[in-house]
Image (cartoon, rainbow, N blue to C red):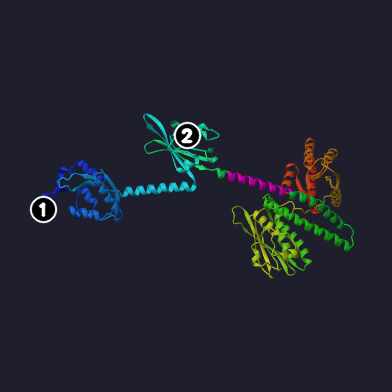
Amino acid sequence: MRVRGRAFVSGGKAEFSVSEDIFNSPEWAREVLRDADTGLWRIVIDGDRGRMWANDTMLELLGLVSFPGPEECYAHWLSRVKPAALPRVLRAVEGMREGAGMQEVEYLWQHPGKGWIYVRCAGRRVADPEGRGSLCLQGYHQDITALHEARESLREHLAWKHNACRIASLGTFEAEWEEEDGRKVCRLHGNDICAGQFGVDFSRPAEEILALFREREPERDEMFWAELEEPSCWVPGRKVRREIAYIHPEDGKRLFEIQWEYIQRADGKLKAVAVTRDITDERRMEQTLRDAKEKAEAASEAKSLFLANMSHEIRTPMNGILGLSTLLLRERLNPRQADYAAKLQDVTRSLLGVLNDVLDFSKIEARHIELETRPFSLFHLLNSIQTIMRARGEDKDVGFRLIRDDSVPEFLEGDALRLRQILMNLCDNAIKFSSSGEVTLSVCAAPSRKAGDLIELRFAVRDQGIGISPDKLESLFEPFVQADTSTTRKYGGTGLGLSICRSLARLMGGDIAVASRPGEGSEFTVTVDLKNAREEPVHSSPGESTEDVSGLHVLVAEDNDINQEIMRSLLHELGVSCDVAENGEEAVAAFARHPGYDGIFMDVQMPVMDGYRATALILEEQKKRGSSVPIVALSANVMARDEEMSRLAGMEGHLGKPVELATLASTLAGWKKRKFKAVRGGSGE
């Protein structure tokens, strides 16, 4: 036998002259086989005795440095076949024995240096050159480890793709054009999910499948499907996406999202790769959510309308009670009568506070509340709170002290009314839940941690009252929650105040926290972000005025007899004369007769003609005359949208009923300044 160019001689006799056999191949053939890691072998089997001859590449593949001899080479090869694969190898040998043609088998083989490798062996039976009738086999041997790993990687990738599509219920199909008998033919291949989605068989010709797609689509978009049948429309990288309705032969009408992209293969040919998704349930869910959203919005609108109507119906008589009690207290009453009138006013204000809490909570819940940004004096606001709280604390022998750090600026920009609401609520609660001792309100300032020119104000309200148990602290700021039911019975309240305060504080860029121990009192800490005021405010605090407004003459449009009487009396107390119109039509006529009013208080809900229409007509008349008379709504409608409607109607303000004397005076003071400025301008000064 010739191995590595030399003949092997056994017992002085050449067993094979391989120079004329498979090993005597041209040099180029040997190089090809060597480069392809393909070794050639011949095996001769006599009974239980096996012998193997191998070329150089085969010896390298077997991990042999030199040829050990036919029997040793055969034993080396056979002993390293993985036991589990040995039956397959022997079946292939049996197939060769029976002359069944070329037999191929892949198996694991233990290489002396590389460990377990994957090999492919193929061979067939040939004539015994010695004529002994021995079983003579010859063939090739390849190391296919890299190929096996690539196939396994591909198999894992395909399995991953299959599982991903299965889990996500994604259908996929590919379309490509091929030459067949001199003509171009479209081929469609799809996965089982896609076939099930559309009820088609991808083994059928592409034209049949595309025809079914078109027939089962109710909208019959011919251009959408025709693009797949026209290769001239295919552009590398172009993406197509569409949602279609589709009539499935068994499931009926379904909705699908189809996306495909034209991808250029390595050989330059184009193919369309598509993904299909059944979105029927998704769209139904979206519609269900839209319907639920619309119902929720309708319910919210109905609730808002109910609250607005409730507010209007309660505020109208409350305006009468508060106004009449205010007027009554200005009369000469004996001490007992004065006490009754004062208590009547207090309980009316308490009822108003409950109503305002409900409305504020509703606004916050619906995200309809908006903060104003106006300059105000913080010092004046705090001093005002101190005056009120000291008066309330005197009845219970509870002191009140204001501590203001030097770091706190006086003039700021923000919503003073809402800040006052927060602090008043906390201080009022502190006095309410204290029977002795002292309540302190302290404030300090520091640069805000947020960007910009904001200042962080930190307020702390501390009392020596009943305190709060630790298990109640976490839920204290939830709406309608109080420390316990006995608190509700003893101290009253809706349980909305702290929830509203926290929401307002967060709207102002801060928050509220509490620390408390039962029997030792509580400390509420509030932080808000405000800006330094660029200019000093005209009035120190909203709703308060000490200016003389006497001498003004105004028009009041009000349909309620009691409210008319109250407005006349309150204005008379301020030295202001007025005319009264019972509806919008009368108000328009009154202005036409006397366009020189200093201002107009306009109710919005009136018979014959409402306040919005009356305002529009009066503004038209003012435009003709070149005059400018301020109009302010005076209404029991106090929702945010009511204020917005007044503004859109052309009114300059919106006062809610019941109106306080101080608020009325503040509005009138602004009108008087406006009148004075107009007079000075008209006189040329």
Circle on res. 523: none
* 639 and 456: which is toward the camera: 639
Query: Can residue 361 be spotted in the picture?
Result: yes
Task: Where is residue 638? Give x, y as percent.
Answer: 75, 49
Position of 21 compared to 682: left or right?
A: left
Residue furthest out toward the top: 182
* 48 and 590: which is toward the camera: 48
The rendered magenta stretch, by its main secondary structure, is classed as helix
**Residue 302 part of the magenta segment:** yes
**Residue 128 part of the magenta segment:** no
Magenta residues, start to end? 284-305
Residue furthest out toward the bottom: 519
Q: Residue at x 51, y 43 (%)?
A: 277
Amino acid beneath label 2 = Leu
Residue position marked by numbered label 1 in the rendering? 11
Position of 247 compared to 5: left or right?
A: right
Q: Residue at x 68, y 52 (%)?
A: 364
Residue position marked by numbered label 2 in the rendering? 210
For label 1, the crowd category at 10 Å Cα-Cα, with few meaning under 14, some 14 to 19 and many 20 or more, is: few
Q: Which quadrant of the view contains residue 81? A: bottom left
Question: Which mark sits nearer the N-terminus, 2 or 1?
Answer: 1
Q: Quick one: SS at disc 1? A: loop
For label 2, the crowd category at 10 Å Cα-Cα, with few meaning under 14, some 14 to 19 and many 20 or more, is: some
Amino acid beneath label 1 = Gly
Task: Where is residue 218? Give x, y as percent.
Answer: 55, 34
